Amino acid sequence: MECQPGHKHIGKCNQTTDRLMTISKEAVTARVDENPDIVAARKVLKTEAEALLQLQDDLDAEFVKALDYIFAAKGRVIVSGMGKSGHIGNKIAATLASTGTPAQFVHPAEASHGDLGMITNNDVVLCLSNSGGTKELSDIIAYTRRFNIPLIAIVGKADSTLGRRADALLLLPDVPEACPMGLAPTTSTTVTLALGDALAVALLARRGFNAEKYRVFHPGGKLGGSLVKVEDLMHTGDAMPLVPEGTPMSEALIEISAKSFGCVGILSSEQALIGIITDGDLRRHMGADLLEKSVSEVMTRNPQTIRPTALAGEALAQMNSTGFNGITCLFVVENGIPIGVISVHDCLRSGVV
């Protein structure tokens, strides 16, 4: 029976509809949980997650020894590995380099054909091999032993060629690959990558590496833009629209038009910023006598300002805040004295969002 508005059974109809919807959602969830693709994917993630937890528990003094070798090195960390380990090694080298530890990936096959010359006595070598018996690494291993270059190994077998010859041994947990055949590097590459991240972040902390230093190595992209400071973008000197207190509005309007910020700052006799005139102020005082007034009569006192060391993202957030009613630029001040001006467009052009 169809339920009509006002019908005495409308409550029961609604309850029935809700129950059917709940049953339908449960059925869909059950079908997803039983989907063989979902089952396989969850098994992979569970296997790798358990391996990471095992790796966490297995960390020991060898990890600290590896950090000591890298921290004491006057040169770079030379990372090397073959196949999937090589791909992971490239990422580890990139992470180390971007977090304050100079690093470079050297392909083991190319090393045997001249690239061993990239490795100096001031460097530390980090070799990756789950089996520990990767033949292509043999020349790099021999080179480090011949010239007394510290060798750190991330390896799955301690009793292996690489494991036995390493100065610091970072042993991967003895866990199965997530691949059902147990052949494709899956779990082993995940834990190797995580161990590389652990080395990089531990070194970062030991060096006192901060966001300011990170920005030096990462000026591009959204991440780089988020670390830009106001002082990097602000306009200074004659580019700032400024007039002294008591200036006629006729002159102030010329300054606003000439500097193209849509505003003008008002200075006291001590050169401190005491006010600002924006489009909003002009609209509020629009009249036949506007040009006869002084800036002191039109300006908004105690304007919003920002520090030069603040992140540009903070400036953009302040300008976009509804509390400040759509401000499009901010004066940058130190001890009350304006030293620059920054606009919304400056932030957007630099990639700050």
Image (cartoon, rainbow, N blue to C red):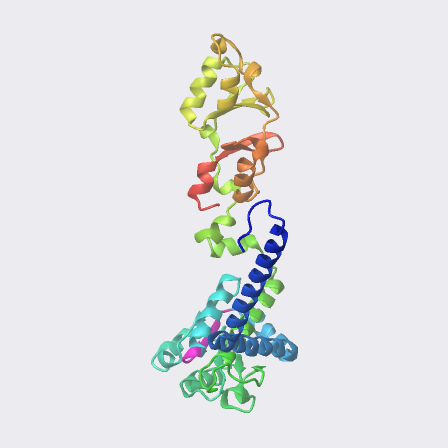
Q: Residue 324 in the image: state x and y as whole percent.
A: 57, 32
* Foreground pick, 69 / 229: 229
Q: Residue 148 in the image: state x and y as whole percent.
A: 51, 82
* Foreground pick, 15 / 114: 15
Query: Could you tell me which residue is drawn at 41 percent across and 80 percent down?
Result: 82
Taking 82 as reference, is 303 above or below it? above
Residue 89 is covered by the magenta coloring: no
Q: Which residues are magenta?
A: 75-84
Q: Residue 280 in the image: state x and y as whole percent.
A: 51, 23
Residue 82 is covered by the magenta coloring: yes
Query: Could you tell me which residue is drawn at 44 percent across and 44 percent down?
Result: 350
Q: Is residue 321 visible?
A: yes
Q: Residue 103 in the image: state x and y as whole percent.
A: 47, 68
Quadrant the N terminus occupies: bottom right
Q: Is residue 209 visible?
A: no
Horizontal side, residue 172 vs residue 350: left or right: right
Q: Quadrant of residue 309?
A: top right
Count of residue discs: 0
* Foreground pick, 263 / 148: 263
Query: Could you tell me which residue is drawn at 42 percent across and 74 percent down?
Result: 87
* Foreground pick, 229 / 339: 229
